[in-house]
Image: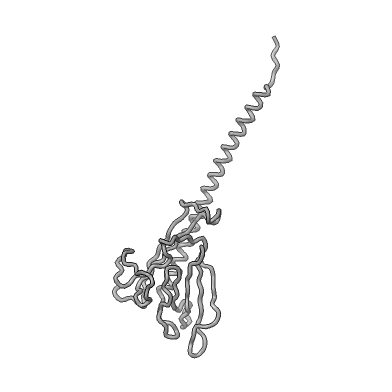
């Protein structure tokens, strides 16, 4: 008895189905690998950005001193804004520096005193220091401590803080490493890290 050679329609459909399932699994696997590599790369870039920014902020804040017009070294000491005076470019004049956290961005504004007598007037120079900053209300960008600071957060000064009481400033930056490849409103919790630096005000320190 002769049998017809080849595949039946059912066998063809089943084969195509199996092929589609296999290809979908391969595609998903590759997508996960690429996503992991991309997240790892972004995380590394975020760590590097945080280190550079914290180093820059720490250097400038540590230099805070009496302004060229005689004003006190610290002017605004809020949880999301820090304004102080420092000669950051070594020209003999104390610039007025302000770091402010607005939305998801950290901004830097500076102004050089002009005139005789010297006064801080005119237009500020403003730049964006860092994006994708996601500090929660429980994690202020700036925290302030007096001369009794002993390495713990228990001695943090309560707002409103008097600039005269501040001897150490703690910087906390919570960054979303996944924001550059996604929507910041849909944060990847595994990509969120907080980076911290403690800065002693060398021109104001007493017992630190």
User: Could you tell me residue 163's position as x and y percent?
Assistant: 38, 76
Of the 4 image quadrants, the one containing the C terminus is: bottom left
How many numbered circles are shown? 0
| Residue visible at 38% across and 70% down in the picture | 159
| Residue visible at 42% across and 77% down in the picture | 75
User: Could you tell me residue 201's position as x and y percent?
Assistant: 37, 74
Extreme residue toward the bottom, this view: 116
- Which quadrant of the figure has residue 24? top right
- Which quadrant of the figure has residue 140? bottom left
- Which quadrant of the figure has residue 205? bottom left
Extreme residue toward the front, this view: 160
User: Could you tell me residue 103's position as x and y percent?
Assistant: 51, 64
**In this picture, is 35 found above or below 127?**
above
**In this picture, is 203 found above or below 196?**
below
**In this picture, is 30 found above or below 102?**
above
**In this picture, is 16 found above or below 118?**
above
Q: Nearer the viewer, residue 160 or 153?
A: 160
Q: Nearer the viewer, residue 24 or 79?
A: 79
Left or right of 158 on screen, residue 173: right
| Residue visible at 51% across and 79% down in the picture | 111
Of the 4 image quadrants, the one containing the N terminus is: top right
Left or right of 146 on screen, residue 81: right
| Residue visible at 52% across and 53% down in the picture | 186
Extreme residue toward the top, this view: 1
User: Could you tell me residue 55's position as x and y percent?
Assistant: 44, 67
């Amino acid at each position: 008895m002769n049998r017809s050679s080849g595949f039946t329609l059912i066998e063809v459909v089943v084969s195509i189905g199996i092929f589609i399932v296999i290809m979908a699994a391969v595609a998903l696997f590759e997508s996960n690998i690429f996503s992991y590599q991309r997240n790892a790369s972004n995380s590394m870039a975020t760590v590097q950005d945080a280190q550079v920014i914290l180093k820059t902020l720490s250097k400038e804040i540590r230099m805070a001193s009496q302004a060229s017009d005689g004003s006190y070294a610290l002017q605004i000491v809020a949880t999301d804004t820090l304004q102080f005076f420092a000669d950051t470019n070594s020209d003999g004049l104390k610039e007025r520096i302000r770091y402010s956290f607005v939305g998801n961005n950290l901004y830097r504004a500076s102004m050089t005193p002009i005139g005789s007598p010297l006064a801080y007037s005119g237009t500020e120079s403003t730049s964006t220091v860092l994006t994708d900053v996601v500090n929660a209300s429980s994690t202020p960008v700036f925290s302030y401590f007096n001369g009794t600071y002993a390495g713990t957060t228990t001695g943090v000064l309560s707002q409103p803080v008097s600039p005269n009481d501040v001897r150490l400033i703690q910087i906390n930056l919570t960054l979303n490493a996944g924001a550059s490849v996604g929507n910041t409103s849909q944060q990847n919790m595994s990509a969120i890290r907080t980076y911290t630096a403690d800065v002693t005000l060398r021109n104001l320190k007493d017992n630190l």
